[in-house]
Image (tube, rainbow, N blue to C red):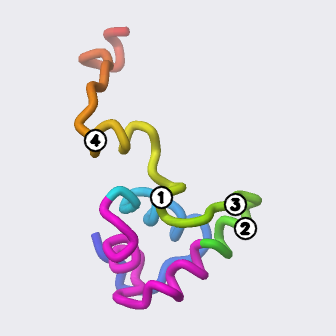
Amino acid sequence: MTSKKKLDGIELISCAKASASAGVEAAAKNCGYGTDIETFRAALQQACADMGVEVDGIADLVTDQQQVVQDGGLEIAPDTASDL
């Protein structure tokens, strides 16, 4: 879902992380920055720095699970949360 306003702080990081596997252009758009990629990158780096996390780019936010899904790997998990 695309934000109508430019996100910042933890909201920006959460949105960027959710969109990271789609690429920086999609993440910027979803986080309210439209096509202003440089402003998005600067805001994301500042938000991460404020939390004490160092990121070099959007790819640093892609989780292992997202990587497995993107690369077509095999994810092994129980059918339900109660079926461990």
Relative horizontal placement of residue 52, taking residue 76 as reference (left or right): right
- Give the residue number, with chain letter if any, for mark 1: 59
* Mark found first going from the N terminus, 1 or 3: 3
The residue wearing badge 3 is: 54
Check disc 3 and report its element: helix, strand or loop: loop
Residue at point 54%, 55% (across, down): 60
Relative horizontal placement of residue 73, taking residue 40 as reference (left or right): left
Residue bearing the label numbered 2: 49
Callout 1 amino acid: Ala
Q: CA distance from mark 1 to mark 2?
A: 16 Å
- In the image, residue 57 lies at what x, y percent? 54, 66
Question: What's under tag 2, amino acid-wise?
Answer: Ala
25 lies left or right of 12: left
Compute the Cα span from label 3 to label 2. 6 Å
CB contact under 8 Å: marks 3 and 2: yes
Please tell me whether mark 1 or mark 2 is closer to you in this view: 1
Residue 38 on image: x %, y %: 51, 87
What distance separates the C-alpha of mark 4 from that of mark 3?
25 Å
CA–CA distance between discs 4 and 1? 14 Å
Q: Nearer the viewer, residue 19 or 1?
A: 19
What segment carries the magenta color? 22-44
Find residue 71 and name its label.
4
Q: Amino acid at mark 3?
A: Glu
